[in-house]
Image (cartoon, rainbow, N blue to C red):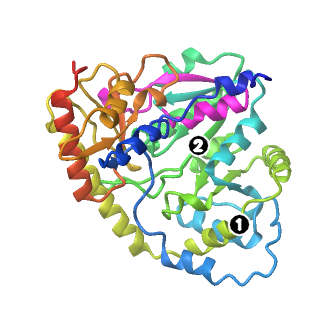
Amino acid sequence: MPSISKKGQAMPASPIRKLVPYADAAKQRGVHVYHLNIGQPDIETPEGARAAVRNADIRVIEYTHSAGLLSYRKKLVEYYKSVGIELTPDEIIVTNGGSEGILFAFNSCLDSDNEVIIPEPFYANYNGFSNMSNVKVKPVFSTIDNGFALPPIEEFEKIITPKTKAIMICNPNNPTGYLYSKEELLKLSKIIEKYDLFLFADEVYREFCYDGEHHFSVMQLKDIEQNVILLDSVSKRYSACGVRIGTFITKNKEVYNTAMKFAQARLSPPTYGQILGEAAIDTPKAYFDTVIENYVARRNCVVEAINRMPGCFCPNPKGAFYAVARLPIDNSDKFCQWLLESFQYQNKTVMLAPATGFYSTPNKGIDEVRISYCLKVADLQEAMNCLAEALKVYPGRK
């Protein structure tokens, strides 16, 4: 029997999804599982966006332009202008989810064995995308003790080598919920300019900022416009993860034209997803006001509950809908599996994501978990009760 590729062997399993078989088995035993492992919002996709798909009278579903429907890209220009970003339609490529945009960025800008520096912990699939692109991730460590703030610029400079071609950030951050400030990004821009690096910025959680804080985009960094690639998605903004529509944005024409080769190779993004994405841009502000109000209540529920648990610590995130918590446990992978295999409280348990999968450095995140607070407050309260009871009886408690 032929062997699989070395690339396939090295491909990491998703820490967000790898425990699904254990969750399925728990459900088959009649245990209710609270899913705090995945960023799947339970808030309805805007009605106007869903109606646009329902009412689309298309007799032949043709390929669209490889860069996406022109009408959608023009509408996206309006959206980005509303958040302080000036673009033209020919600076936007519509992608099959934000994931494809990241692959376009890696493959357009980085050669095999080039290095991309990413503050860790970071979105787990960056490890997978780097593996698929033969790119090496060089982590720069951020710590839970200061809420996962951007590491000092000197820490970036320490690990820059001739192979370093890019720095990547996620803002607001997945998995930590940290919101990088304008001041932090201005400092980062200086190192981008000094070493002439690319800056990849995953800004899919732009709308999810709390406590009066505001998002500052890398596209607003004036001195490095040719170095920046913005990666975005409708998945979280409009609670439409399944339509698989994202965007790859750059003002660098050489990068844009290169990415278009990859876009042409996969032919086109999905038609109905673009129809939904275009209509979603007209979603009224009241929708987002309600969403933000919901997420602030959910965040407060989780963070306050964890910080009341003996030996636990959870910083208060300013964005996205995730938090990373430090727990008094020996091993987060073992603990998260134990919750599903061996624990129940009042016939309920909780599914978390081990934070080890959000680091590329071995043994980092061993006592941390990522929590997605995408459930309604009543469910989160039950889930936190389960977690508190689990920590009392976990055999590997420190």
Q: Is residue 203 above or below residue 127?
A: below
Was residue 133 drawn as part of the magenta stretch in this picture? yes
Quadrant that contains the N terminus: top right
Q: Position of residue 218 (x, y in %)?
A: 57, 46
> What mark, if any, has residue 73 been given in the picture?
1
Q: Position of residue 203 (x, y in %)?
A: 54, 49
Q: The residue under label 2 is which amino acid type?
A: Ala
Q: The residue under label 1 is which amino acid type?
A: Arg
For the residue labelled by badge 2, is the local secondary structure a helix, a strand or a loop? Answer: strand
| Stretch in magenta | 122-151
Q: Quadrant of residue 192?
A: top right
Q: Position of residue 165 (x, y in %)?
A: 70, 27
Q: Is residue 210 left or right of residue 114?
A: left
Q: Position of residue 201 (x, y in %)?
A: 58, 43
> What mark, if any, has residue 201 been given in the picture?
2
Q: Is residue 51 above or below residue 72?
A: below
Residue at 22 percent of width and 21 percent of height = 397
The CA span between labels 2 and 1 is 19 Å
For the residue labelled by badge 1, is the local secondary structure a helix, a strand or a loop? Answer: helix
Residue 50 is at least partly visible in this image? yes
Label 2 close to label 1 by CB (< 8 Å):
no
Q: Is residue 78 left or right of residue 253?
A: left
Which one is in front, 22 or 73?
Answer: 22
